[in-house]
Amino acid sequence: MKQVFMLVLILNFWGLVHGQDLDFLNSQEFSVHFNQSYGEYERNKFDILLPKNDSIHGLAIFIHGGGFKHGDKDAIYKRKEDIRCFLNNNIAVASINYRFYSSNDSLGVKVSLKDIQTAIQYLRFNANAFNIDKERVGCYGISAGAGASLYFAFHDDLAIQGDPTLKGESTRLKCAGAIATQSTYNVFKWKKIVPYMRLVVPLKRKQIYNSAANFYGYPNYKSFKEQIRMSSEQLDMLAMIDSQDPPIYLMNLMKENFPKTDNVVQHHRRHAIVLSKMLKKNNVENYLYTSKTVDREGDIDIKIREFIVHNLK
């Protein structure tokens, strides 16, 4: 009797961990697979929710935020309306974890981006198993997840032509959505993008430049100095934009203007504004929402989930 009680307790706990955030869905209309592996590392995990029908699904991949230093794929379950909207429109939704960057491996954030690339390619490689149309794949996310989504939307295809493994799968996206995004991962460009940064940098030069070095995988600015141009330019999403890029959704609703904290610097509305201008210059369809035009996400006329459905359905 005691063993039966313990088993029920464990199952109930499992439901609390993985099921409570799905109570808003009709369990008869979807299936879910938790903590599936897409790579060899501990954090190479994903969850995927699939509509229960025989038709081929589009796929929306959610990438969590956290500055590439923390965060978890469970963040998707806070966006209940997104999940409901996707499943109701025959779009599967996956949420991924990825490795966090180290400040002493000369790779830095490239480690996180490499894992996200692998996840995109893995899901395409296994499209048949999930009944997914690999041509209808989009990404969206918050903060670091937003910037990562844009990175793959703008980057040339990273598929290795002729490779029969997942490395031969495309990394190009049908659309991308960015909530509280950065405009580029050439962080040295932020001085020209974020208002008043030219005043702040001289006051906190050592701190800012060492943080930049850490982002690219170096312990301090001195050890990084000779690699600045190569490391930063390789991650400049603004420079990657061209007329072949997919539709983009940008939403930076932070109201603060003066860069008094890292949070303001990283999520300033100017990031989205500068991106939108570059996209328009290259004739790329884009939607822009900032604190200049709207106060909160709920007031936006075209929601990010509606944008994604429109492009993946």
Image (tube, rainbow, N blue to C red):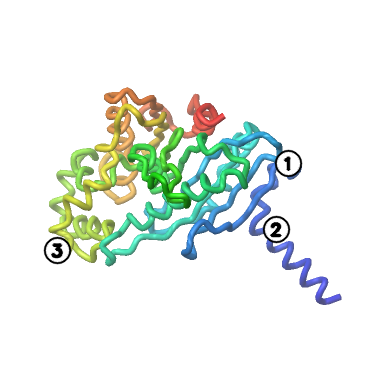
Image point (40%, 27%), residue name: 287
| Distance of label 2 from label 3 (alpha carbons) | 50 Å
| Distance of label 2 from label 1 (alpha carbons) | 15 Å
Type of residue at label 3? Lys
Q: Position of residue 207 (x, y in %)?
A: 21, 59
Residues at badges 2 and 1 in contact (C-beta under 8 Å)? no
In the picture of the structure, the residue carrying the numbered disc 2 is 15
Q: Nearer the viewer, residue 164 or 279?
A: 164
Side of 73 where 274 appears, left or right: left
In the picture of the structure, the residue carrying the numbered disc 1 is 26
For disc 3, the neighbor class at 10 Å (few under 14, some 14 to 19, many from 20) is few
40 versus 87 height, above or below: below
In the picture of the structure, the residue carrying the numbered disc 3 is 222
Q: Secondary structure at mark 2?
A: helix
In the rendered image, the quadrant that contains the C terminus is top right
| Distance of label 1 from label 3 (alpha carbons) | 56 Å
Q: Position of residue 164 (x, y in %)?
A: 47, 50
In the rendered image, the quadrant that contains the N terminus is bottom right
Image point (30%, 37%), residue name: 271
Query: Residue 98 sits in which quadrant?
Result: bottom left
Question: In terms of sequence position, does the residue under pointer 1 or pointer 3 come before the other?
Answer: 1
The answer, for residue 70, to whether it is visible in the render is: yes
Question: In terms of sequence position, does the residue under pointer 2 or pointer 1 come before the other?
Answer: 2
Type of residue at label 2? Gly
For disc 2, the neighbor class at 10 Å (few under 14, some 14 to 19, many from 20) is few
